[in-house]
């Protein structure tokens, strides 16, 4: 029977190599094993969190290994020795190697060369019996060395781990290549401006570009293709701005000298430079700023679109500070990334917190969405209804602030009731959302009109299910009319919604034996969905096939 170890590895090092040892430990423990590797090697765990023992105490005052270190060495499957000129001189590194060899008949020792030639930096006790251990040279490139260590610890081929890393780099290169292509299509001016954003110029520059594109969309006569491309660009800018504002918020919460230097690098050189500095600075889980630092890292990795890394640092932050703000922030991130199970776990945890009515309503409303996506409809209904009770009270005292939130909960309940075939209850909820949104739009048309069209579309769907065709057409047609007017303001946001309503109204006409009207609407919806699917096949291919199939069916029926 194979022995079960507490640790995958014990890191032995001279304390002059502490920073390097810390980097290696973080690299190992932060590595999430890809699904493809776990499928190929079923014995692999999901990650290597808390799998490495690294002593952080200075040993110079002791004459022998402490019981803590001896127990950790016994409980470690592998010994990693950081090899350097300082390690050769360290009696403690020597003692740890000798003790490990004594406790492990089939010693698994990995030597990692921090710098220098192997013959000069390998401790003598590693080679005195003529069996030189596996040596991994990190002096020529840390990333590759880290992947070799991980592959060795996991007992798998290095090529499997390294090829995955290369594929991820290739994906990032393709992504930035696509961005560059979009910029070239938009002209030299836009390209130059985007380059400034990519290097983290100030938000002022982003705001100027947003204003410029908004002006062109409103005042210029543009083709549909031009409108869509500008809309794509506008979406990139707005998303970049939102991410940057969020990142800057966390920079503002940190007041260390390292974070201030990282902020300057972020402004001047970009995300990668800031991350490199933050990664090089050590902190321990008890530090007050540990959670904030990791929340900041999560935001920076989100800007890089490296969502696995972002998740890793969110999790690290929550180990130390699982406050409402941190947990809720992470839950929203997970929901955006369609990680509903983990988001649900976090939101359920927040239910037990002592929250304000506003925060509790936020948690319950999001929890309802998570339950609905996981097809746990009874729990979704319970969460929504509790959120509704809280938001009604909040809106009664401060309607200007809370009526939009209240409308969203009515809307969500309407969607759920329709899914449960409780159509009359769904209609009641959607009408309440509709009335609240109309009142908001009367005060601020630009901000709230699109939400009004969402209620119109929902009512159109609902009346269609109730076989009240005239009412369904009325709401669909009004939604289409308004969405066509909104389209130039933000094509990226409004085009999918317009295409959906066109498609649903076309289906209604087809079902009521009006094929000519159905065809016109299907063709317009098809044109828009072709544009969307070309830009984002994963998101819109299914919708495109749906419209194409409906149009083909209509054509065959006319023959």
Image (spheres, grey):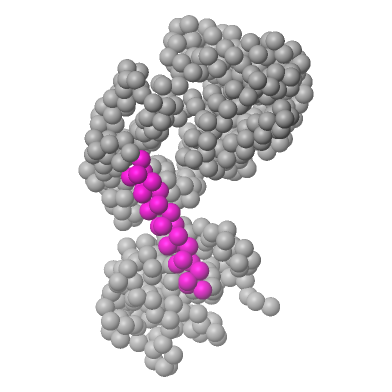
For residue 375, which quarter of the picture? Answer: top right
**x then y, percent, for residue 328:** 52, 34
**x then y, percent, for residue 187:** 27, 36
Q: Quadrant of the N terminus?
A: bottom right
What residue lies at 49% left-to-right and 27% top-to-bottom? 495
Residue 68 at least partly seen = no
Q: Nearer the viewer, residue 474 or 336?
A: 474
Q: Nearer the viewer, residue 442 or 103?
A: 442
Q: How many marks?
A: 0
Q: Nearer the viewer, residue 303 or 58?
A: 303
Please indicate whether residue 375 sits to the left or right of residue 221 in the image. right
What residue lies at 30% left-to-right and 71% top-to-bottom? 140
Q: Is residue 99 above or below residue 351?
A: below
Residue 262 at least partly seen = yes
Q: Which residues are magenta?
A: 157-182
Residue at the extreme bottom: 130
Q: Nearer the viewer, residue 255 or 182?
A: 182
**x then y, percent, for residue 433:** 60, 14
What residue lies at 42% left-to-right and 43% top-to-bottom? 302
Please indicate whether residue 203 sits to the left or right of residue 431 in the image. left
Please indicate whether residue 64 sits to the left or right of residue 435 in the image. left
Query: What is the chief secondary structure element of the magenta stretch?
Result: helix
| Residue 160 among those drawn in magenta | yes
**x then y, percent, for residue 178:** 38, 46
Residue at the extreme front: 559
What residue lies at 46% left-to-right and 16% top-to-bottom? 485
| Residue 102 among those drawn in magenta | no
Q: Quadrant of the C terminus?
A: top right
């Amino acid at each position: 029977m194979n022995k079960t170890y507490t640790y995958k590895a014990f890191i032995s090092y001279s304390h002059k190599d502490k920073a390097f040892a810390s980097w290696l430990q973080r690299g190992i423990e932060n590595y999430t094993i890809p699904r493809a590797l776990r499928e190929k090697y079923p014995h692999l765990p999901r990650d290597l969190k808390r799998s490495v023992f690294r002593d952080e105490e200075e040993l110079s005052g002791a004459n022998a290994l402490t019981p803590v270190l001896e127990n950790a060495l016994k409980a470690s499957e592998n010994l990693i020795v950081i090899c350097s000129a300082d390690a050769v001189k360290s009696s403690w590194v020597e003692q740890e190697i000798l003790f490990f060899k004594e406790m492990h008949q089939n010693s698994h020792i990995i030597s990692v060369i921090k710098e220098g030639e192997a013959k000069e930096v390998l401790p003598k006790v590693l080679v005195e019996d003529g069996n030189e251990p596996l040596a991994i040279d990190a002096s020529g490139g840390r990333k590759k060395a880290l992947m070799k260590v991980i592959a060795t610890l996991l007992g798998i081929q290095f090529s499997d781990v390294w090829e995955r890393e290369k594929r991820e780099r290739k994906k990032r290169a393709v992504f930035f290549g696509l961005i560059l292509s979009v910029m070239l299509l938009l002209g030299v001016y836009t390209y130059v401006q985007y380059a400034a954003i990519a290097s983290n110029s100030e938000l002022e520059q982003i705001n100027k570009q947003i204003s410029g594109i908004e002006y062109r969309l409103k005042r210029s006569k543009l083709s549909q293709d031009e409108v869509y491309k500008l809309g794509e660009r506008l979406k990139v800018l707005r998303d970049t701005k939102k991410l940057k504002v969020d990142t800057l918020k966390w920079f503002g919460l940190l007041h260390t000298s390292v974070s201030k230097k990282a902020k300057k690098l972020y402004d001047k050189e970009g995300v990668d430079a800031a991350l490199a500095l933050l990664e090089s600075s050590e902190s321990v889980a008890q530090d007050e700023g540990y959670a904030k630092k990791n929340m900041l890292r999560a935001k920076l990795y989100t800007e890089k679109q490296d969502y696995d890394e972002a998740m890793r640092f969110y999790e690290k932050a929550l180990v130390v500070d699982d406050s409402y703000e941190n947990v809720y922030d992470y839950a929203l991130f997970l929901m955006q990334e369609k990680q509903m199970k983990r988001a649900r776990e976090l939101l359920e945890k927040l239910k037990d917190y002592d929250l304000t009515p506003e925060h509790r309503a936020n948690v319950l409303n999001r929890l309802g969405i998570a339950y609905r996506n996981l097809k746990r409809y009874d729990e979704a209904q319970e969460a929504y209804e509790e959120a509704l009770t809280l938001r009604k009270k909040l809106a009664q005292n401060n309607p200007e602030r809370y009526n939009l939130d209240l409308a969203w909960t009515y809307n969500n309940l309407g969607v759920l009731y329709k899914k449960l075939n409780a159509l009359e209850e769904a209609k009641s909820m959607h009408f309440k959302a509709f009335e609240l949104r109309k009142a908001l739009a009367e005060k601020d048309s630009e901000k709230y009109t699109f939400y009004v069209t969402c209620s119109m579309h929902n009512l159109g769907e609902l009346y269609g299910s109730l076989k009240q065709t005239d009412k369904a057409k009325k709401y669909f047609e009004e939604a289409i009319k308004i969405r066509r007017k909104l389209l130039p303001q933000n094509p990226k946001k409004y085009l999918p919604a317009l295409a959906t309503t066109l498609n649903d109204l076309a289906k209604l006409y087809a079902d009521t034996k009006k094929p000519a009207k159905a065809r016109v609407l299907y063709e317009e919806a098809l044109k828009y969905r072709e544009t969307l699917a070309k830009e984002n096949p994963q998101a819109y291919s299914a919708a495109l096939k749906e419209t194409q199939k409906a149009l083909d069916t209509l054509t065959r029926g006319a023959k």
